[in-house]
Image: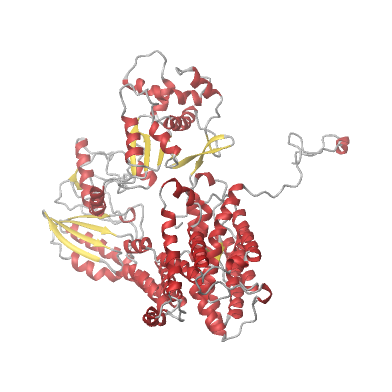
């Protein structure tokens, strides 16, 4: 029922100017542009202007086409697109495609192809298939960009030397010796000057470098070369911008239908993939700036496709180059402090103004300078970081084939060739299974590395039958998939071997391949990462007799768990590590805790150690270089590596009762926490510090239950560091803190969880304690210096043990709020 129904008949005559208990309505909102967006737009404009001209020069299009594309990309794609801070315009990744189209079909038909590519992008955006484009292997995308970069660099090298580029890379390489023999010194000098300024400008040392570094290196390089060429009177080709009245627009396409369709598909593919990958990269840059959290929404990739499609339709119709998201300009936009899409749109407006009013100045720019700038951009597209990444993931073959295909065959052909090789590599990995057998101290080990499919069954059966009858055997499955044929083979052999008096342990390196089955003494079905006693065990109603094997009750599918059993002559059972031992009825060991420790170490040596040995050896050589200091409670339920998905060398961890950070001077002889903070910040140069509290904290419960004036045990002396937190959470409680702290606590809003209130007083204190310890951190000199220099970030975190959920601290108008960490896009 509506709450606005009049209570009396005559109340309908009462007119409210505005709803009760609300502020009076304001007039129409004025359009405002934040100062940060204005400065960012100017920075991006100064980068976009020379690059747009250079890319137009590299494609062979009219130079004005680059300015048209830059303006349309900024205004149209910036307004409609789904990534607010991505800057679109003529991209170096489209240079080869566009140059090939111009050569085959002419400029006007190329504009029409751009329009049709934009229409195709609109269709893809309406079908909401943007996420599907991210399924393309990164090795293919990086290889495509590298091949385009090589093509650009080789072609522009001819212009740098004072000549004219050929139509393909092989032709350019063949013509290069003759070009070197007939180079033009003036063009070469201007190009070398441009490259020198481009390389050295960002590396100017000292305060002068910090001040001058705000000016884009591309602008300085082109402006410096232009000034030198003008002052010395060098005669060399320069930018020629014809009158806008004679600017060529799109016309109906003329050419073979299949060729035009292929051209549209190629343009659509390159534009879309580059724009979507750029949007994902911008999301990462935004996430690295805490000030933008909540202000800039995560990219809507389908809307981004719609924006790019609309921009390409407008650009092609107006005689502009194809448009895509540009990484260089987008990263500059974020780095310059942009906070909304207004910066992208304003940069497009500035390009329009420059194209109309700065024509005489633009016509002073030497073509050799623009060619050198574009050549440098092309070389940067061959990223050593990308090569190292694909090498680490064993996809260097896909990268190399795609790169060579783009260089020697073309973009569409190179990408298709890369996809074919990627599919072949994936099939090869799926079918490549290594099965080995060795004997150690009387135990036969069968190690299966790879996926167990029906193709590997003959080899698996042959190796399994090499294990003698009645012997102890351990089958280690190092893979994540097992089909029905492999399951039946392994299950049948296990039953036969145990019936002949042998024992079989089948273990897996991953949770999906862990294999366990209840035996007489040990019916524990446990996770593979928890061999210790503090876990849940599902005991069967009755233990099966020795020598029997069956499917696990938790999964009866072929891909589920196989049974582990012991033979009739085997005393006791065998655990996941292969060590013999007996357990009690609850799954806890009958022996001392040291036996559990030995079993855990044995499991590490067998399962984890071989996988981590190379990484740990590298860390031993290079030393630790963690990026974060993680300060949390000593509670045994808070496993830092598990809840943060971190590994060796990632976190510098400090644990104490209550995750306290004592204020400087209040340690009473124990400087361990302060020393760890100083070492992490000043020596290890960590970039962030996280204080993590958790639900059900015993320290917080002890703090609430403590009686003033009681005996001062070591624990009670330590808990006094939590009294300011108690004052913050419960300001009405009389605690032993100074008056200044009481005044601060009285005026502060209580920290809370987003979406719900604190479950009880203890949880409220846990939340307040995280916020309070962050304040204590800021009082440490090393932390204060790093925060002032912008080299350090502080984060608050709350881990709810029962829910297995993490909350991150954020500040809003209502105070400190712990926001639930939801699933993120891992491909981003």
Query: Can you give x and y, in whole percent of width and height, for residue 562 in the image?
Result: 29, 57
- Please identify the residue farthest to the top as the structure is shown: 709
Nearer the observer, 68 or 73: 68
Side (left or right) of 761 relative to 465: right
Pinpoint residue 108: horizontal percent, then vertical percent. Answer: 61, 79
Q: Nearer the viewer, residue 475 or 117?
A: 117
What is the x, y in percent for residue 763? Answer: 47, 31
Q: Quadrant of the N terminus?
A: top right
Residue found at x 24% / y 66%: 434
- Residue 519 in the image: x percent, y percent? 24, 48
| Residue 557 appears anywhere in the view | yes
How many marks the image carries: the answer is 0
Which residue, as the protein is rendered here, is positioned at the far left?
Answer: 441
| Image height of 394 relative to 817, above or below | below
User: Residue 278, can we see it?
Assistant: no
For this view, does 61 lie left or right of residue 176?
A: right
Q: How is the image coloured?
A: secondary structure
Q: Closest to the observer: 579 or 237?
A: 237
In the figure, 316 relative to 666: above or below? below
Q: Residue furthest bottom?
A: 256
- Image quarter of residue 238: bottom right
Left or right: 78 in relation to 610: right
Tell me the quarter of the picture where residue 304 sits: bottom right
Position of 218 relative to 741 (above/below): below
- Give 774 or 176, whichever is nearer the viewer: 176
| Residue occupying the point 60% across, 54% down | 343
Q: Quadrant of residue 313?
A: bottom right
């Amino acid at each position: 029922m509506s709450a606005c129904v009049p209570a009396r008949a005559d109340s309908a005559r009462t007119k409210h100017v505005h709803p009760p208990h609300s502020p009076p309505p304001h007039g129409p909102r004025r359009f405002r542009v934040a100062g940060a967006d204005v400065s960012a737009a100017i920075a991006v404009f100064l980068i976009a202007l020379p690059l747009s001209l250079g890319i137009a020069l590299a494609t062979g299009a009219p130079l004005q086409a680059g300015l048209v594309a830059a303006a349309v990309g900024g205004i149209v794609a910036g307004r409609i697109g789904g990534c607010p801070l991505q800057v679109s315009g003529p991209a170096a990744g489209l240079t080869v495609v566009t140059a090939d189209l111009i050569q085959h079909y002419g400029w006007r038909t190329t504009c029409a192809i751009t329009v049709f590519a934009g229409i195709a992008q609109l269709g893809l955006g309406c079908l909401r298939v943007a996420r599907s484009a991210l399924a393309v292997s990164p090795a293919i995308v990086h290889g495509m960009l590298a091949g385009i970069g090589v093509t650009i660099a080789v072609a522009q090298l001819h212009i740098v030397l004072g000549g004219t580029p050929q139509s393909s890379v092989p032709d350019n390489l063949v013509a290069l010796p003759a070009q070197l023999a007939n180079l033009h010194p003036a063009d070469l000098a201007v190009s070398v000057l441009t490259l020198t300024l481009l390389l050295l400008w960002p590396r100017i040392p000292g305060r002068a470098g910090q001040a001058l570094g705000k000016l884009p290196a591309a602008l300085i390089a082109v402006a410096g070369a232009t000034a030198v060429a003008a002052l010395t009177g060098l005669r060399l080709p320069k930018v020629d911008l014809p009158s806008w009245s004679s600017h060529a627009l799109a016309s109906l396409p003329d050419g073979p239908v299949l060729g035009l369709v292929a051209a549209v598909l190629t343009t659509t593919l390159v534009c879309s993939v580059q724009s979507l990958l750029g949007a994902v990269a911008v999301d990462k840059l935004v996430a690295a700036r805490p000030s933008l959290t909540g202000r800039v929404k995560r990219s809507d990739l389908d809307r981004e496709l719609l924006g790019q499609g609309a921009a390409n339709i407008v650009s092609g119709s107006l005689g502009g180059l194809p448009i895509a998201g540009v990484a260089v300009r987008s990263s500059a936009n974020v780095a310059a402090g942009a906070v909304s899409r207004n910066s992208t749109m304003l940069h497009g407006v500035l390009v329009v103004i420059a194209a109309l009013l700065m024509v005489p100045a633009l016509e002073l720019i030497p073509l050799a300078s623009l060619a050198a700038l574009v050549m440098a951009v092309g070389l940067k597209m061959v990223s050593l970081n990308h090569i190292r990444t694909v090498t680490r993931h064993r996809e260097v073959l896909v990268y190399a084939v795609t790169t060579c295909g783009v260089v020697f065959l073309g973009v569409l052909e190179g990408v298709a060739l890369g996809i074919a090789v990627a599919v072949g590599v994936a099939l090869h990995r799926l079918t490549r299974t290594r099965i080995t057998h060795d004997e150690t101290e009387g135990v036969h080990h069968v190690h299966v590395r790879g996926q167990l499919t029906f193709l590997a069954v003959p080899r698996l059966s042959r190796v399994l039958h090499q294990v003698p009858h009645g012997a102890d055997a351990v089958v280690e499955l190092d893979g994540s998939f097992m089909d029905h044929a492999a399951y039946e083979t392994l299950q049948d052999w296990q039953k036969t071997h145990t019936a002949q008096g042998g024992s079989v342990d089948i273990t897996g390196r991953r949770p999906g391949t862990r294999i366990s089955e209840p035996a007489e003494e040990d019916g524990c079905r446990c996770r593979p990462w928890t061999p210790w006693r503090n876990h849940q065990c599902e005991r069967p109603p009755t233990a099966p007799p020795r020598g029997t094997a069956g499917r696990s009750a938790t999964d009866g599918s072929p891909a589920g768990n196989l049974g582990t059993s012991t033979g009739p002559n085997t005393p006791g059972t065998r655990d996941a590590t292969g060590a013999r031992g007996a357990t009690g009825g609850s799954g806890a060991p009958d022996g001392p805790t040291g036996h559990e420790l030995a079993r855990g170490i044995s499991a590490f040596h067998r399962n984890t150690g071989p996988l981590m040995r190379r990484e740990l050896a590298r860390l031993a050589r290079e030393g630790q270089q963690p990026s974060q200091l993680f300060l949390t409670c000593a509670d045994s339920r808070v496993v830092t590596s598990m809840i943060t998905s971190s590994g060796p060398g990632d976190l510098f961890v400090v644990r104490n009762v209550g995750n306290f950070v004592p204020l400087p001077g209040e340690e009473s002889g124990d400087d361990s926490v302060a020393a760890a903070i100083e070492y992490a910040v000043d020596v290890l140069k960590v970039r962030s510090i996280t204080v993590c509290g958790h639900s059900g904290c015993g320290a917080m419960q002890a703090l609430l239950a403590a009686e003033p004036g009681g005996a001062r045990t070591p624990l009670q002396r330590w808990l006094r560091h939590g009294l300011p937190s108690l004052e913050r959470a419960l300001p009405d409680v009389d605690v032993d803190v100074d008056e200044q702290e009481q005044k601060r606590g009285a005026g502060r809003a209580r920290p809370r969880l987003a979406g719900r209130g604190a479950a009880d007083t203890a949880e409220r204190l846990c939340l307040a304690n995280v916020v309070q310890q962050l304040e204590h951190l800021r009082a440490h000199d090393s932390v204060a210096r790093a925060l002032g220099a912008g080299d350090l970030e502080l984060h608050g975190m709350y881990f709810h043990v029962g829910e297995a959920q993490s909350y991150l601290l954020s500040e809003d108008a209502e105070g400190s709020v712990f926001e639930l960490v939801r699933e993120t896009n891992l491909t981003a």
